[in-house]
Amino acid sequence: MESKEGVAKVTLNRPERLNALNSDLRGELLKTLRTLNSDASIKVVVITGAGKAFCSGADLTAGPVDVMDELTNSFHPILREIRGSEKIYVAAVNGVAAGAGMSIAVACDIRFMSKDSRLVTAFHRIGLAPDTGLAYILPKLVGAKAYELLLLGGELSAQDAASLGLAKVVEDPVQSAVHMAREVSSGPFRAFVASKKMLNLTLFCEMDQFLRYEAALQASLSRTKDFNEGVRAFQEKRRPVYRGE
Amino acid sequence: MNTVIEETVESARIFRLNRPERLNAINLEMVEDLVSSFNRAEDDSNVRVVIITGNGRAFSAGADVKEMASMRLEDVVRKGHMPLWERMKTFRKPIIAAVNGVAAGGGLELAMACDIIIAAESAMMGQPEINLGIIPGAGGTQRLTRAIGKYKAMELVLTGKLVPAREMERMGLVSQVVPDSWLMDESLRMAGEIASKSPFA
């Protein structure tokens, strides 16, 4: 984390694992966001990833997990810090944003994406459904165009995301994000925050109820044979064989 | 076959209504079994919370109408099921209804005689007694009115219609609606949370 003139830059820093969100990284990220959100001198937060990825989502190599606990006490609080914050969040998507990494990018207020970056749902590949609010926030932003992507899984190229109005495609997303962050922080900032609050009320007012529902469904899925197979296939680097069980 | 299956998970005692082929309709045998189950749960100091749920696709479709038909209606209401309601009234530990499917008539009254109602999202609830030309005879008219107000209660009792769990949540009868696959997890979680607090309070 670095900050300068009201703009903080948060870099997810596990480049060797494509910034996969293991418990340590999630804990640090949550702590950092809480610190920034309660720091009156900060106005804009830029989130990016170290190395070639933005964030590859939950770390599947971490072993058996309690999905209900992880979503409720880790992923969802991170999401709430971003959405509920009186700061403006800018995602600088420098490479692939997959799974919960995509959710975090989509939860930010503004996105810049590099030309070769992608938003990948990833969840269905291991027998799960989208989580960390993705199936709530994305349809609110782009409507029916996200339906099939969220239903069956898939990905959006940076160009796809741009044509949906979801992101701007730039050469250097971090540079562009910081540039915009400076403009935002030197503008009528209270008006921007009030606008964010109104948009939250218009678009996301039932997020807490949704997240409870999401956590229960995802936790149920995490007990299925398909999820077990999906994770094992991922670890063994082979194609999963699903049976709908 | 036992009409109630008991299971203990940590400090929670689960009663599973077990007449799935009759949608867990409450007959005299089930009344007797439930009363014994409550007695055992009351006496067992390891049990801090009771959870009632149904085996199969229903919570309970209500009083067993076939059995009722062979008795005088007054005997059913006054004698037949009374021991259950009396037992629940004096039962000292919290009871959670985990409504897994349809809860109609006496089935909904059973859920309402509990302290907290958690429902699966596919569950339907109502007081369809009017369709048989009778009224909810086990507290339904009273408990429903207190929970959702006179006008909604009148609508349900006079039309006999069944409404989805989410509507019951909006009306304040159901405290939580969860995905069907998560009903027992949430019920046990809440039971655990309650059990962790002072039993004297």
Image (cartoon, helix red, strand yellow):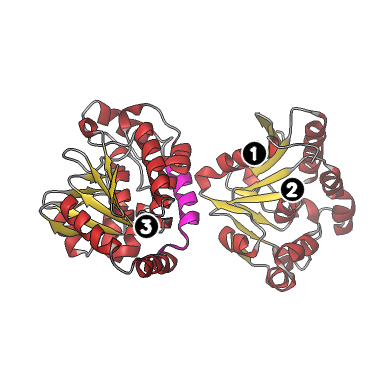
Which subunit holds the residue at mark 1?
A: B
Dots 2 and 1 on the same chain: yes
Label placed on residue B26: 2
Q: Is residue A13 above or below residue A140?
A: above
Binning the other alpha carbons within 10 Å of mark 1 as few (below 14), some (14 to 19) or many (20 upward) gives few
Give whichever of B5, A95 is nearer the camera. A95
Quadrant position of residue B18: top right
B78 with respect to A141 (left or right): right
Q: Which residue is mark 3?
A: A87
The crowd level at tag 3 (other Cα within 10 Å; few <14, some 14-19, many 20+) is: many
Position above or below: A113 against A222: below
Mark 3 — on which chain does it sit? A
For the residues labelled 2 and 1, the Cα–Cα distance comes to: 30 Å
Mark number, residue B193: 1
Locate residue A228: give its quadrant: top left
Q: Earlier in the sequence, mark 2 or mark 1?
A: 2
- Image spot of residue A234 (x, y percent): 26, 31
Instruction: Using the numbered discs, state the Cα–Cα distance from disc 2 to disc 3 in whole angstroms.
Output: 57 Å
To which chain does the residue with label 2 belong?
B
Q: What element does badge 3 sit on?
A: loop
The stretch in magenta equals A203-218
The residue type indicated by label 3 comes to: Lys
Instruction: Identify the residue shown where x is 76% and y is 64%.
Output: B146
Q: Nearer the viewer, mark 2 or mark 3?
A: 3
Is B54 above or below relative to B129? above
Q: For residue A211: magenta?
A: yes
